[in-house]
Each structure stands twice: as structure tokens, then as C-alpha cells.
Image: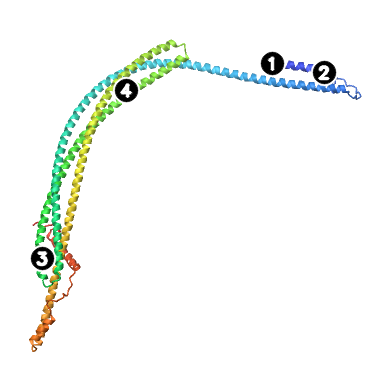
Amino acid sequence: MVMSFFRRGEETGKTGVQAASPAYRQISITEQPVSLKAAAPQPYQVPEINDFEAFGSALEENQQNSQDLLASLSSLQERVSTLLGAHGQSLNETGALRAECTRISSLLDYESGARRKADQENARLAGENKDVRTANTQLRTEIDAIREEFAKLQNVHGVTCEEFSIIEMRLRDAEGELAERAMQYDEASTLLKRAQQELDSRSRELSATREKLDLETTAHQLLAETSRRESTMQARDLARLTEERGHLKASLMEQEALVANLQTAVANLKQELSLVEERHKRAEVELHTLQTSSALEIAHLTTKTEAVGSKAELVEKLLITSNGRNKMTDEELQAARAEMKRLKSELAATISRAERVEDELRRARMSGTESETARRELAAYNNELTVKLRETESLRSRRDREADAIKRDLDTRIDSDRHEISQLRTSLEIAKSEIRQLRAERAILNGQLEVARGERATAAPIVFEEQESARMPAAHFSPIIEISEKSLRMHDGAVAADEDAALYERGERPGMPTAE
């Protein structure tokens, strides 16, 4: 076709050239026939106007012919390009057709292989169905065993509930005992408060005695007698205080014994609770193992059913694709569909059996959850009991702290009383030293008087007595040593330190009442 087109173009070009060549040869001046013989020179002739017109017309015709040739060439180029595109398209179509042929052949091979695989899968699925049936029978036997074990666990749970009820009764008894001990402790605290009030009253009495001492410092002559009386009074007070301290110490020892008994009772209760918790933990571990085993079996069954379902879906997809691509294998596909329907029915039966197994497992789980809720309730009750025990322990510790604070207050007050007593003793010692100094001064003055009397024996005795009376007034005498509270307290601290050292040497504790 392309060659005929080119031949037609060449023929049209030749005809055009042949049509234009005689006119061009007639009109052209330069072109002359070339001969083999040499032409004779001719003289130059001036061309005419007609010749020029003919030459111009020939040029115009030649230009038109060239334009026509160019147009024909462009049309030829367009036709050639279209022919080349059509040829490329035809080549592409042939390649696509060849690829389609190869694809169809590969699809046919794949479908034949898929048929073979489907047959193999059908045989394998039949074997797996048999395995599933055997597994279902095994699962039923295992479920029966699990039910028996669950019944045993329920019996064990009932026994544990009874034990917990017994423990609750014991804990209630322990709570009653703790309440009684708390009442005893409250009574002891009231006794301690009364003792504290008595000590406050004694401290007030000591402040009153201090005021009395401040008043009695003005009278130096009556200081010795009053100091003796006060020392006897203070000795009696000290004896009485020691007796009261002995009573307080005995009451504190009784309270400490009660606290020790309470601690032992709480320790016994904690041991019993720990034993019960261990039993409960063992039961929980057994339940957990049973639940894990049942969960593993359920997971195994679900994986098997999912594998069977996925395989069935793959077979269905393969059959659908083979039905769409090959209409020639409808009978075989119908047979495969019938087999698939049969497999589906068997799968539905297996799924229904699996659902029954799941229902039974759900029931087992529900019973397990009920036992777990009961266990949680028991754990909550145990937690409440532990909280109550902690509260009782906190109350006991708080009461112990209060008792320790009361003891510390008593010790501090006893120390302050002892300090005041030592101050009074120092004041007595200072008063005694002042009395001794006054006696020494009086003895010195008496000696001076006796010497003066011996020297003035010749003088009149009446004048000497008047001078002596004027020299030594009895009422208006000022002491040589000034007594202050600071000096009394310093001396009192020294005396108290000496007394504490003496008590340590005897083996007694300072600040505590004696065995008497």
C-alpha cells in the first residue's frame, strides 16, 4: 500500500514535469540544446518584451508548480507519519495479543493446578474434619474432668468459707478483748491524770512554802527554828511523795503487762490470718492453672476453626475465579461447589459444636468469676480486719505515746520539785552558815567585852553596861551575808547533784520512788 502511494506520487511528478518542460524550454533563454558538436558563435541579440513576459509567466508557473510540489510533499509526510503510527499501533496490538495469549495459557495452567490443589485440600479437609471430631471428643472428656475439678474446688471453697467464719468469730472475740483492754487503759490514764492533779497541788504547796521562805528571810533570829520545822515538814512530804511514786510505778508496770498481752494476742491473730491467706492463695493458684489450661484449649480450637474457615474462603475464591475465567469447566466447578457445600455443612456442624464448647467454657468461667468474686469479698473482709487491727495498733501506739508524755511530764515535775527542795535545803544551809557567822561574831564581841571588863575593872560597872547596851542593839541588827534567790538556787543545784550521786552509788534511779 505504501509503495503504491509512492509510485502514484512519482507518476504525478513525472507528468507535471513533462507538462511543464516544453513551455519552459520554449521560453527559457539560457537553456539551449546541448549537442556533441561545438556550436558556432552567434551574434548577441537584444530580447524583446514578449520574451520577457513569457519568461515571467514561466517563472510564475514554475513557482506555482514548486508550491504544489511542497504541498504534495507535506501531505506525503503526513500520510507517512500516520502510516508509521498505524504500523506502531498494529505492532503494539500484536504484542498485547501475544501477552494475552501467554497470560491465558498461564491462567489455564494455574487453574489446572488450582483444581489439583483444591482436590488435595478437599482430601486434607476431610482428614482435618476427622481430627476435629476426635479433638471434640477429647475436649468433651476434658470438660467433664474440669467440671469434676470445679466441683472439688467448690467444696474446698465451702471449707475455706467455714474457716473464714471461724476466724471472724475469733477476731470478734479478740476485738472484745481489745475493747476491755482499752477500757482498762482508759482507767489507768484517769489514774495518771489524778496523780498529775495531785502533783500540781503539791507544786502549789511548794510555791506556797517558797513564799513562806521569802517572808521568813527577814527574821534572822527565828530562821533556825522555822528552818527545822520546815525541814521536818519537807521530809514528811518527801516520804509521802515517794510512796505515791511507788504506787504510780506499780500501776505503770501493770499497764505495760497489759500492753504486752495485747501485743501477743495481735501477733497470734496475724499468724492465723497469714495461714488463711496462704490457703486462699493456693486455691487461687489452682483456679488460675485451670483457667489457663481451658483458655489454651479454647485458643487451640479457635485457631483450628479459623484455619478451616480461611482455607474454605481460599477454596471459594479460587473456585469463583476459575468460574469467571473458564466457562468450559462448569461441571467440575459445580462438583467442587457441591463438595464445598458439604464442607460448609460439616464446618457449620463443627462451629456449632465449638459454640457449645464455648458455652460450656463460658459457664465454667462464670462459675470461676463467682468464686473469684467470693474470694475478692473475703479479701476485702480480710483487708477490713487488717485496717481495724491497724487502727487498734495506732490507738495503742497513741495511748503509749500519751503515757510516755505523761511519764515525761511527771519526771519533769518531779525533777522540778526535787530542784525546789534542793533550793530550800541550800537556803537552810545558808541560813545555818549565817547563824554560825553571827554566833562567831557574838563570841568575838563577848571576848572583846571580857577583855574590856578586865582592863576597866576599876571603872564603874553601871557605865560599862550602858555603853555595852548602846554599842550592841538587839532589835536593829543587819546581817553580814546577804541572802538572794540566785545563791539559794545555785546551792540547791549542788545539793541535788550530791543527792543524785548518792542514789547512783546505792543502785537506785534518781527521780523514781524507792522500794519502800
Would you say the residues marked 2 and 1 are in contact, meaning their CB atoms lie under 8 Å apart? no
In space, the residues marked 2 and 1 are separated at their CA atoms by: 28 Å
Instruction: Please tell me whether mark 2 or mark 1 is closer to you in this view.
Output: 2
Looking at marks 3 and 2 on the same chain, the residue that comes earlier in the sequence is marked by: 2
Q: What is the secondary structure assignment of the residue under circle 1?
A: helix
Q: CA distance from mark 2 to mark 4?
A: 105 Å
Residue 105 shown left or right of residue 156 in the figure: right
- The amino acid sitting under disc 4 is Leu
Query: Which dot marks residue 301?
Result: 4
Q: Which mark is residue 23?
A: 2
- Circle 2 packing at 10 Å, graded few (<14), some (14-19), many (20+), is some
Tell me the mark number nearer the camera, choosing from 3 and 2.
Answer: 3
Kind of residue at disc 1: Phe
User: Which quarter of the rendering shows the N terminus?
Assistant: top right
Q: Nearer the viewer, residue 394 or 345?
A: 394
Which residue is found at the position 41% from the left and 11% from the top?
Answer: 334
The circle drawn on residue 230 is 3
First reached walking from the N terminus: tag 2 or tag 1: 1
Q: Earlier in the sequence, mark 4 or mark 3?
A: 3
Observer-nearest of 149 and 40: 149
Q: Which residue is mark 1?
A: 5
Q: Residues within 10 Å of mark 4 (few under 14, many from 20)?
A: many
Pinpoint residue 228: horizontal percent, then vertical percent.
Answer: 9, 67
Q: Residues within 10 Å of mark 3 (few under 14, many from 20)?
A: some
